[in-house]
Amino acid sequence: MKDQKGHIATQDPETVISIRNLYKAFGDNKVLNGFNFDLKKGENVVVLGKSGSGKSVLIKCIIGLIQPDKGTINVLGDNVPDLNTTQLDEMRVKVGFLFQSNALYDSMTVRENLEFPLRRHWIHTSKEEVNELVMEVLRNVGLPHTVDMMPSELSGGMRKRIALARTLILKPEIILYDEPTTGLDPITGKEISNLMVDMQKKYNISSIIISHDLNCVKITANRVVMLIDGTCYATGTYEELERATDSKVKQFFE
Amino acid sequence: MKKLFIEIGLIARFTGRFFTELFKPRFEFNEFLRQCFYIGNKSLPLVAITAFIMGLVITIQSRPTLVEFGAEAWLPKMVSVSLVREIAPVITALICAGKIGSGIGAELGSMKVTEQIDAMDVSGTNPYKFLVVTRVMGTTLMIPLLAVLADTVSLYGGYLGANIRGVVSWDLYWNQVFDTLVYGDVMPSIIKTFFFGFAIGIIGCYKGFNSNKGTEGVGQSANSAVVISSLLVFIIDLIAVQITDIFNLN
């Protein structure tokens, strides 16, 4: 149901993302097959599923990088597949995306990486304000000394923190994390997971986290969604799903 | 064969998108200037050294034949025409296909496989405009300038080459060069370098932008960008020669 501005009215004002009957196939491979999902304000939801089950495709559909075949993706009142480029850019100020590979620009320093989204989204602030914002997010992730370093000079964990800082600099209401702890050692992975929770509390951010890492799931998840056969197969807290008797769910926690 | 036609179709579509995006705002002037600096300034020493050597070598190699026919005095004339019409522009384009084309293919390819292009999209930037339009415009405008530089430096190389065995005064050499060269020699050779530059830029960007298969794909993108753009340089050169010949421009 759409209002006069073309926005889809959400049933619950606390729901920031609402996905209904989402379908996406690549050739004969049906990745999302009628997926339904809701994300509440301030909630951290982890999407668990096997490799190739469509978890990354799901969040790329949410941010508008992949066009779904069918279904609605209501993000903060807008149906993403219906948005034009300008509207998508406006939506992406409010929705951050942390890439699995960090996606830091190799040719830019940490400062330039952090300034890039500010400048590109036409967020007009003075040089001093931009600098203050950059230093604030760097302090939040504990790396203010890296401001003039190149991404190639940073360790994997540091790069992940800088990528998170770049996502946070626009002060988004929602962050989509694509496997945030993949490729990190368990200690660094735990640090990143704790950092994600800290940022959620500090800025009241809602998050969808794609992860295989059960330690990360345990630390970050308010709720876990199992993406199996392209559908939302099961949902519940980590403890509830850990005790589940269903064989498909159980295999993830064994 | 089917694959080849599909590839040609995809390149044509990619090129068509370039012209639609070129005139749409927002214009990425800063990135365009950065690319011009990178493509022009950083390729300058390599192009200059190669052009100088080519001028020197062509003159040294041509001299014995001309001496045999008692036409040694024609050396500056012959060398200048061959350098300006053909050798300097083509050598410049081939060097740029190797240096710039492979660089663009590898850079965009690695940006693609490490999701930097997606990150750009998410950051409110049209990656095609920011990465492709600026680079293609950079190669299209800078390679002709490099070719003009190569013309000049290779002619200077030719002067030194002519003086290794024989004696040709500075004034005599340049008088003969400028008496020989007409607009019909210079202009078509410069105009074709715009097309060389465009081909090198568009192929490098196309290969990089459509890179896949991880790091292996990055290497393949860089490699095929060089191979295809070098081939295109020769094809464009062949077409340019036919056109100048048909319209009797030389």
Image: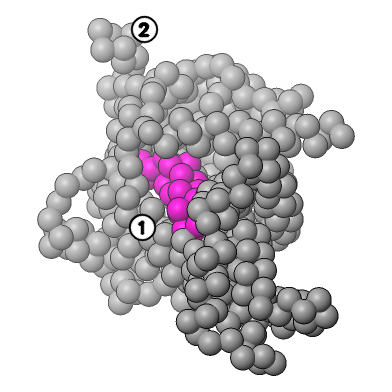
Q: What element carries label 2?
A: loop
Disc on res. B33: 1
Vertical relation: A112 (above or below) B68: above
- Give the left or right position of residue B238, taking residue B31 as reference: right
Q: Is residue B146 visible in this depiction of the protein? A: no
Q: Position of residue B97 (x, y in %)?
A: 63, 60
The Cα–Cα distance between marks 1 and 2, rounded to whole angstroms, is 48 Å
Whether label 1 touches label 2, CB < 8 Å: no
Q: Which mark is residue A1?
A: 2
Q: Which is more toward the observer, B163 or A213?
A: B163
Estimate the x, y position of residue A65 in percent, counting from the top left: 50, 35
Q: Is residue B132 positioned above or below A145 on the image?
A: above
Mark 1 residue type: Leu
In the rendered view of the protein, which quadrant contains the N terminus of chain A? top left
In terms of depth relative to the viewer, which is nearer, A78 or A117? A117
Label 2 crowd bin: few (<14), some (14–19), many (20+), radius 10 Å: few
**Badge 2 sits on which subunit?**
A
Question: Which secondary structure dominates the residues rendered in magenta?
Answer: helix
| Local SS, label 1 | helix
One can see residue B129 in this view:
yes
- The spot of residue A238 in percent (x, y) is 52, 43
Taking the view exactly as shown, the residue that stands out farthest to the right is B1
Q: Residue at x 73, y 37 (%)?
A: B7
Residue A32 placed where, x, y %? 63, 26
**B25 vs A134: above or below:** above
Residue type (three-letter) at the residue carrying disc 2: Met
Give the magenta part as a residue range.
B121-144
The subunit letter for the residue under badge 1 reads B
A209 displayed left or right of A114:
right
Magenta residue check for B132 = yes
Occupied quadrant, residue A234 = top right
